[in-house]
């Protein structure tokens, strides 16, 4: 089973200030989330998301999916170990290894936000990967 690595969990943080303190430690101090009004609106949504991430026990077993599975991560993202990402390849068929992207996070951010801050390398990879899948399936 794939386990998600957390240096600290967000759910035990019942008081709003603790939640945001832990959130910023994990993701950086996003300037868009500094408003108390915005925090009040998005905190319940984020708590639900984190609950799912921190408690999910999937029914998948290796080679359960009959499609390729590629785990992606930014280089330097300490929340994704190469071992974790490599483990995902055994869940798809055929097996495909992990893919790491070079990214430059914003000064307040972390490499984990590469999809938002530097999406082009992911889009280029997916474009090439999907084109290869189409070519291999048409034979």
Image (cartoon, rainbow, N blue to C red):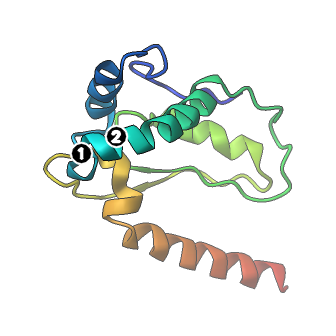
The image shows residue 91 at horizontal and vertical percentages of 75, 43
The residues tagged by marks 1 and 2 sit, at their Cα atoms, a distance apart of: 6 Å
Residue 110 visible to the viewer: yes
For the residue pair 29 and 68, the one nearer the viewer reads as 29
In-front residue for pair 92/57:
57
Q: Position of residue 48 (x, y in %)?
A: 57, 34
In the rendered structure, the answer to whether residue 124 lies left or right of residue 126 reads left
- Image side of residue 30 versus residue 137, left or right: left
Badge 1: how crowded within 10 Å, few (<14), some, or many (20+)? few
Residue that appears at 82% across and 79% down: 137
Callout 1 touching callout 2 (CB < 8 Å):
yes
Q: Identify whether 7 is placed above or below 63.
A: above
Check disc 2: other Cα within 10 Å, few if <14, some if 14-19, many if 20+.
Answer: some
Residue shown at 72% from the left, 75% from the top: 133
Q: Check residue 35 in the rendering and tell me which mark sits there, or answer none.
A: 1
Helix, strand or loop at mark 1: loop
Residue 59 lies, with reference to residue 30, above or below; the image says: above
Residue projecting furthest to the front: 37
- Where's the N terminus, which quadrant? top right
Q: Is residue 3 left or right of residue 133?
A: left
Q: Residue furthest left?
A: 107
Number of numbered discs: 2
Place residue 8 in its image quadrant.
Answer: top left
Q: Position of residue 31 (x, y in %)?
A: 20, 50
Q: Quadrant of residue 53?
A: top right
Residue placed at 73% from the left, 26% from the top? 57
Q: Residue at x 27, y 33 (%)?
A: 24
Residue 84 seen from this side? no
| Secondary structure state at the residue bearing disc 2 | helix
Residue 123 x/y as whole percent: 48, 73
Q: Quadrant of the C terminus?
A: bottom right
Q: Residue under circle 2? A: 39
């Amino acid at each position: 089973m794939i386990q998600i690595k957390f240096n600290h969990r967000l759910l035990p943080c019942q008081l709003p200030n603790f939640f945001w303190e832990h959130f910023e430690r994990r993701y950086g101090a996003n300037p868009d989330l500094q408003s108390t009004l915005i925090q009040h609106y998005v905190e319940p949504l984020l708590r639900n998301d984190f609950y799912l991430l921190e408690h999910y026990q999937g029914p998948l077993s290796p080679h359960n999916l009959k499609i390729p599975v590629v785990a992606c991560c930014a280089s330097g993202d300490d929340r994704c170990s190469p071992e974790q990402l490599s483990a995902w390849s055994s869940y798809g068929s055929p097996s495909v290894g992990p893919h790491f992207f070079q990214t430059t996070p914003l000064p307040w951010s972390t490499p984990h936000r590469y999809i938002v801050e530097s999406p082009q390398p992911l889009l280029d990879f997916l474009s090439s990967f999907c084109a290869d899948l189409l070519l291999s399936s048409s034979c």
